[in-house]
Amino acid sequence: DIQMTQSPSSLSASVGDRVTITCRASQSISSYFNWYQVKPGKAPKLMIYTASRLQSGVPSRFSGSGSGTDFTLTIRSLQPEDSATYYCQQSYSTPLTFGGGTKVEIK
Amino acid sequence: EVQLVESGGGLVQPGGSLRLSCAASGFTFSRNWMHWVRQTPGMGLVWVSRISNDGSSTTYADSVKGRFTISRDNAKNTLYLQMNSLRAEDTAVYYCTSSPYGGFLEYWGQGNLVTVSS
């Protein structure tokens, strides 16, 4: 199974800050990589797919980069509604696997 | 508007069975692969199973293989998960989710809680 290691596990930042979350795969997964936002009591939401493609309707302050084993999610200017837990996921092979999550809090 | 509405969850004793359903609308169900993903209380997301758009191919996580069966009815736009021999560690919120070709998970339901406890 491909292991996904996400960091940090949590962070606290101010509105307007630039936030970066990283994810590392245990083997190369090309660009078969995605990011999700999860808020309590709500359906998870696809944010970025194929490493860098912004899902329709997702604000442009979100961006993704990387390929192979190392990937990054960047929130250019953090907003209050971005408070959530973010998960990375590889779609290179089954079992599909997720990172452990990064809880983003607003100071 | 895309909707995935799960049902069938609840409280069940260890060793028991449950069948989850997921009714889809607002997109072409028969063209999408479908998955079940679960989230245990306070923990992260864990992929459970997937089925191809025509139902001919299924894949399972090792933790549920032989106990869970995924299926679909494209005429009814409905996905199913038959869960047998349930264990305490199967307690989780179960989400159904769609993907255009088996990769990224595009649309998600609100989730359905399954509790396995005596």
Image (cartoon, grey):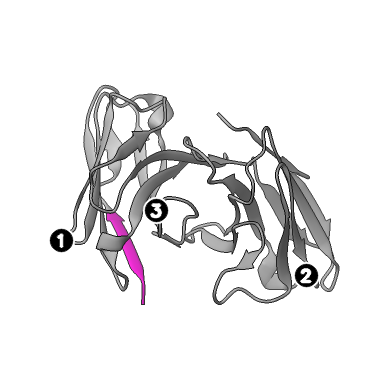
Subunit that carries the residue with mark 1: B
Disc 1 marks which residue? B76
Q: Considering depth in this image, is B49 or A51 the residue closer to the camera? A: A51
Residue under label 2: A78
* Residue extent of the magenta highlight: B1-6
Quadrant location of the N terminus of chain A in the rendered image: top right
Give the distance between the C-alpha atoms of the residues marked 1 and 2, in whole angstroms.
42 Å
Front of the two marks 3 and 1: 1
Q: Helix, strand or loop at disc 3?
A: loop
Q: Secondary structure at mark 2?
A: loop
Label 3 amino acid? Gly
Give the percent coordinates (x, y) of residue B50.
36, 43
Circle 3 crowding by C-alpha within 10 Å: few under 14, some 14–19, many from 20: many
- Relative horizontal placement of residue B50, taking residue A97 as reference (left or right): left
Q: Are marks 3 and 1 in contact (CB under 8 Å)?
A: no
**Residue B106 percent across, percent down from the top left:** 46, 61
Q: Is residue A47 left or right of residue B86?
A: right
